[in-house]
Image (spheres, rainbow, N blue to C red):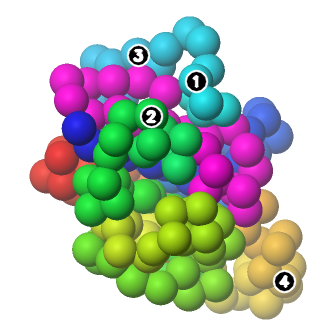
């Protein structure tokens, strides 16, 4: 069994924010593959299934996602190498996708939480670039990650989300 985790914050006010890129990627993947989210949350997550792959959007805030991921892994007996975590990264150029089989949290609090609850950083991840240096300088890091995508960025999202969807499919 595999587990694909999209990181984000719960609540409509966070839709289309940079920090919710992981949620957005999974929603796009589900739409492209004709999948539906289950009607009842499980272990504190919105979840769905496609064959032997589980997909989750933890409903804890981004910085506390690890506990939800750990619950799914324990219950379904999933190894760290069999998960894929999808998160935003404001140090990567907007639209760039960086996949790694393991690595450091590098300041990403969602990954730090997962590392803490799993006791390892040895799991695959896709980092989705959200960089916009001009906007980030004006706002500061916290407000930047919680900001909505610009109109120009929104125009590019379908193409970027299609590439992410293909990488998810290839990973599972």
Task: Determine contact: label 2, label 1, CB under 8 Å.
Answer: no
Query: Which element is circle 2 on?
Result: helix
The residue identified by callout 1 is 42
Mark 4 to mark 3 CA distance (whole Å): 36 Å
- Give the camera-side residue of 38 and 123: 123
Q: Residues within 10 Å of mark 4 (few under 14, many from 20)?
A: few
Among the two numbered marks 2 and 1 on one chain, the one whose residue lies closer to the N terminus: 1
Residue drawn at 13 percent across, 52 percent down? 170
Mark 1 to mark 3 CA distance (whole Å): 15 Å
Count of residue discs: 4
Q: Is residue 64 left or right of residue 87?
A: right
The residue identified by callout 2 is 75
Q: Residue 140, labelled with which disc?
A: 4
Q: Position of residue 17 (x, y in %)?
A: 68, 54
Mark 4 to mark 2 CA distance (whole Å): 39 Å
In the rendered image, is residue 20 in sight? no
């Amino acid at each position: 069994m595999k587990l694909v985790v999209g990181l984000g914050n719960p609540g409509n006010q966070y839709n289309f924010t940079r920090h919710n890129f992981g949620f957005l990627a999974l929603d796009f993947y589900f739409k492209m593959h004709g999948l539906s989210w289950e009607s009842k949350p499980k272990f504190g997550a919105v979840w769905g299934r496609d064959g032997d792959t589980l997909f989750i959007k933890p409903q804890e805030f981004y910085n506390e996602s690890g506990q939800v991921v750990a619950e799914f892994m324990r219950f379904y007996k999933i190894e760290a190498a069999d998960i894929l975590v999808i998160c935003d990264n404001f140090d990567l150029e907007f639209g760039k996708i960086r996949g790694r089989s393991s690595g450091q949290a590098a300041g990403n609090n969602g990954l730090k939480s997962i590392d803490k609850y799993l006791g390892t950083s040895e799991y695959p991840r896709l980092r989705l670039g959200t960089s916009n240096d001009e906007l980030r300088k004006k706002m500061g890091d916290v407000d930047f990650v919680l900001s909505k995508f610009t109109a120009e960025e929104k125009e590019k999202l379908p193409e970027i989300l299609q590439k992410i969807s293909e990488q998810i499919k290839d990973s599972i």
